Amino acid sequence: MHQITLIAGDGIGPEVTGAAREVVLAAGASVVFTEVMAGLRAEQECGTPLPATVFDSIARTKTVLKGPTQTPFGGDYRVYIERKDAEGRLVERDYPSIAITLRKELGLFVNVRPIRNYPGVTSRFENVNLLIFRENSEDLYVGRERMIDEDTAEAIKVVTRGASERVARFALDYMRALGRNRLTIVHKANVMKMTDGLFLKTAQETAKAYPYIEINQRVIDALCMELVMKPEEFDALLLPNLYGDIVSDLAAGLVGGLGVAPGANFGPDCAMFEAVHGTAPDIAGKDMANPMAMILSAVMMLRYIGETIAADRIEAALSQVLKEKKYVTRDLGGTVGTKRMTQAIVEKLQKH
């Protein structure tokens, strides 16, 4: 049995993670979920959004299925945690958000977002099948910001050869395993000559060991224009952290929105799978949330742990429900709620 740490999260998180868990178990996957509390509720009850129990569970399972968590905008909000170093000494650290904290502390250096069309999901484009690889550990998201004076703030952008090579090699290996053969490196090296220039050069050098994969590059603004004109012409994208964050959400809009976009974060010995949409507190608890992105994230998790048969069954059942459009949530053009859509997917699994 595969041990999975489940973080329900905030807002609609408990509803969509509950749906994903129900579908995974109905598909016959050999998994056991251990739920731990993280997010705003944990901060209210435990004094921290990420209690030690979260890290203790992940240290044991090495695999996380995470719902959306909420981090306040602006201000001086930081996520403070206490961890022990290799020598057992207590070390205090702080990060700007829950998601960044988990990625940093767990060594999750790459974010992977599949973007593709699904049957029955309305979108402006067809034949989109895109993989986005986002470097997760550095760039402007290192969180090194400061106020110079009351009218001026600055942030430090960090790019290293080691992290750039690591993410490029991961992307190329991932593509090789899937039989994909065209990678576009995205940058702004025409202006950010040292930082983005290093990212671009390192990725290009790393790719020389993969001659069967075609490599090209795009400046970030040109890429965004091309994506909203002809997204079907791209196969896979490799981006630094900030650009990757923005482009992956933009790309989700090409195929129906964040409600249909799964996500995964990988490290050397740990992985976290999460829906990329927000907590939607305005509809939390109202049985209105679309569980599709969370279910697809669980499918990515099942493939990661080797439960490919269950993953295939869930994708087939979900595709049938989407195609029929009878039991899908309002944002997908239907009239039912989270529970009924989940039930419809489970019913398909039970029939086949």
Image (cartoon, rainbow, N blue to C red):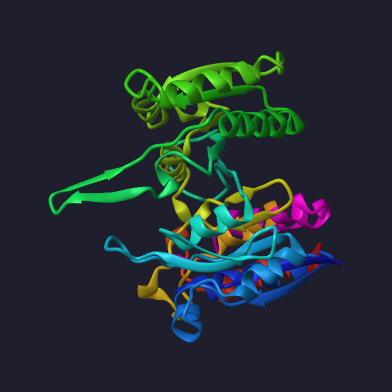
Residue 321 on the magenta segment: yes
Q: Is residue 82 above or below residue 297?
A: below
- Give the main secondary structure of the magenta stretch: helix
Up-down: is 146 above or below 349?
above
The image position of residue 101, as x and y in percent, is 51, 59
Q: Is residue 240 above or below residue 74?
A: above
Q: Nearer the viewer, residue 249 or 148?
A: 148
- Residue 118 is at least partly visible in this image: yes
Residue at point 47%, 33% (across, down): 159
| Residue furthest left in the image | 151
Q: Across the whole image, how many numbered discs are drawn on residues?
A: 0
Q: Position of residue 206 (x, y in %)?
A: 64, 20
| Residue 77 position by quadrant | bottom left
Q: Can residue 327 be seen by looking at this rendering?
A: no
Q: Is residue 39 magenta?
A: no
At horizontal 46% and vertical 67% (from top left) the residue drawn is: 80
Q: In the rendered view, would you say 223 is above or below 108?
A: above
Magenta highlight range: 301-330
**Depth order, front residue of 305/310:** 305
Q: In the depicted view, which residue is nearer to us: 351 or 100?
A: 100
Q: Residue furthest right?
A: 1
Q: Residue at x 47, y 64 (%)?
A: 334
Q: Relative to residue 216, is residue 145 drawn left or right?
A: left
Residue 349 in the image: x percent, y percent? 76, 65
